[in-house]
Image (cartoon, rainbow, N blue to C red):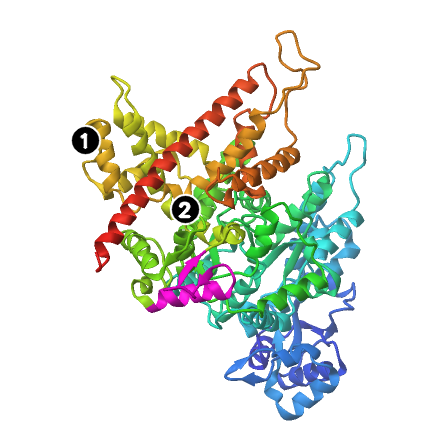
Amino acid sequence: MSTEPDLAGLLAAHPETVLLTQASTRTEARLIRDRIAAAGGTSRPPVSLGRIPQSLLAEPDLRLVPVRVAWLPAEHAGRRAAQLTDLIRDPYHPSERQQRRILARHPGQAIVLAGQPATIDELRERWVETTGGEEEADFAAYVARRATLALDRAEYQLHGPRYKTPSLVKEEILASRRFRTGLRGVRRGADEAPPSLAEAGHILDELVAGWSRRLIDVMPVIGRLIFQRGFDPQIDYDDSQVERLRAAMARQPGILLWSHRSNLDTLVLAAALQEKGLPPAHLFAGVNMAFGPMGAIMRRAGVIFIRRSTADDPLYKYVLREYVGYVLEKRFNLSWSIEGTRSRTGKMLPPRLGLLSYAADAYLAGRVDDLLLLPVSVSFDQLHEIAEYADYARGGQKKPEGFGWLYDFVKAQGAGHYGKIYVRFGEPVPLSAFLGPPGGPIADDPAARRLALAKTAFEVAWRINQGMPVTATALITTILLAMHGAALTFDQIRLALADALDYLASRTIPRTASVPALAVADPVRATLDALAAGGLVTCVADGREPVWLIGPDHQLAATFYRNSLIHFMLDPALCELAVLRVAGSSGAGTDPVEVFWTEIGWLRDLLKFEFYFRDRDEHRRGVREEMDRHDPDWEEHLRAGPAGADALLTRMRPLVSHLLVRPFVEAYRLVADVLAHDEPPSEGASADGASAAGASADDAEVIRRALGLGRQYVAQRRLRSSEAVSVLLFQTALALMRNRGLLEGGSDLAERRSVFLAELRDLLKRLDRIEDLAIRRYIRDAVRDDPLE
């Protein structure tokens, strides 16, 4: 940045300088002339940035300095930023009438800036390097663009790093030699000519987003007004994580990859970045959210709208890849949900690799030294959206976005109080740690590159999961869901909480401040009251003492909260089932410890589409640590035979597998039941009896039948609760069965489906045994602690 004193020094040191002036009004032009005169003037007259003569560009040693006026907003509470009232007029770009008023009353709000100088020879060299320099007539436009970008840099240095904004993006990309060369290689069909620059430009018009400084200030405030209708005004942070993130974003361009549980996530994250003084990030969103004038406003607020499906359009994919590379090359931050869409189950979805692969392309091509992937979790005490999620899981249809949808969403935010919002920033993941150096061997090996990228995404998702704090809401809904619709008294709820709190305290599991507080009565009652006010929990208070339950109609919705903590309790659940497998095994000469590890591997493979597991060796270390926590001599107890395994299981607490694993197994069992009773096709069979077309199942039809079968089993009490009857879980079940070859034809398909169904039924029997043991233990503890006994 250069203000008037710097301009004076610059002109004194380099009298052969031409100032390129950029003025949008006569007032700005006059102010620039006055400041130039006050700085000592120049030997050559200034030139308007929009009208650079060709004769000027023929002087290779001539030094050019761009100049413009920057306007500062009025100061409020010690901070210069746009206010909500500034939505009708932009303080960063005031009208000429407003400019005259500012100069008369507050002249310090007008700053004459000078951008970075450059000689004609230096600019020409860069022009040839970046564009190829094929058309001399394009050089003047290139000089004007570079001058504008130099002024933009000077202005964001004046305002601060939050206001670093991209400009002239479309023009810069289309003029790039790199872009034009790549475009010639794009083919939509074998016999089609390469797309034109105009076609690519239309796609860039759809993609390119910018930031209005006014909207950088105002949009987070508007977002905060929306989510504060239902939540506490203060977002909950870990300040040490904020400072770590600040340092990381100062080192390298970063990509904020966040968990997606609510449509509020982006509003919360934008408010959090503003509140903590962190640079904003371009946000990727589905083009379905660009409805009406909202699309234009959000583009000016840094939102990049992309199509949901790009597989059939190589031109769109190419332009998007180049756009992502350009934004990262210019050191702008990006942001998107690593899950790609909202999780309607409460647990992390598999990561999407599409946008991340484009970022990897930019890194491997050497356009950036490194990229930092920044894990972010945004979580909530309660969400009104879980009712919509439950309806979707039962087979309902997603409501399309539009003004009616937006009105209903904002209205619902004010319908109750949903508690607090928690934002956590995980340890950054350098892309170089997984992909190696730019231009390295992975760059030319698609299979190795995809594997490395998948591991990168997995690591980010793992860190998001591990940083997401357990809430009081999650603990209490987990306890009530375990009762399958039966009610608990207040003392019974507190008794069940004791084991959970002891377990959390024994491990380094992140918790909200509300969780340790559950050790005393008042916070437990406050959480129950909040859940009852939200309609999720029913309180029956007209008897001898009040009791609380989650009824059948709300069980599916409540699983959203339970699933938010399930990844912390997954290893204990697997350990219980593996110990029980040893207790039920009687094979002579079989090493019980090996039986234990075989069962862990089988369960891991069964649930691999539901949960993130570390690599096998690391996961095995985690399981060993969990067993050591229960009993350091656990292997000796297992080798003592079934009696030793039974004794070990009775000492393991809390018992959780029947709470956490059963719903997924029951959902798988429903789908397996439907498939096992499908009649294989009889036509088109080959000579060996296999169907030529195969017995592939239609996913939608299988899900429809599984929903019907699930409702029947719930009515017959053949399922513990209705939470397993879920389209979302059935989709995962089908992914698992497709992976196991159970959706394709073959002479033994029916047999293989029956075997898998039998395995699931056997697993459910073991879950029944663990549930019986947990209930007996609970009754024993309740009797022991009852002063009347």
Image quadrant where residue 631 sits:
top left
Q: Residue at x 46, y 71 (%)?
A: 234
Binning the other alpha carbons within 10 Å of mark 1 as few (below 14), some (14 to 19) or many (20 upward) gives: some
Residue indicated by mark 1: 636
Q: Nearer the viewer, residue 141 or 586?
A: 586
Give SS at disc 1: helix
Residue indicated by mark 2: 567
Q: CA distance from mark 2 to mark 1?
A: 28 Å
Q: Nearer the viewer, residue 557 or 133?
A: 557
**Label located before the other in sequence (2 or 1):** 2
The amino acid beneath tag 2 is: His
Residue 327, relative to residue 407: is it above or below?
above
Query: Are discs 2 and 1 less than 8 Å apart at CB?
Result: no
Residue 758, relative to residue 708: is it above or below?
above
State left or right for residue 611 relative to residue 83: left
Span of residues in magenta: 522-549
Question: Which quadrant, please, contains the N terminus?
Answer: bottom right
Q: Where residue 226 appears, x then y in whole percent?
A: 59, 70
Q: Residue at x 67, y 66 (%)?
A: 407
Q: Residue at x 65, y 69 (%)?
A: 212
Find out whether residue 547 is within the magenta segment. yes
Q: Residue at x 30, y 66 (%)?
A: 520
Question: Which quadrant, please, contains the C terminus?
Answer: bottom left
Image quadrant where residue 502 sits:
bottom left
The amino acid beneath tag 1 is: Glu
Q: Nearer the viewer, residue 651 or 205?
A: 651
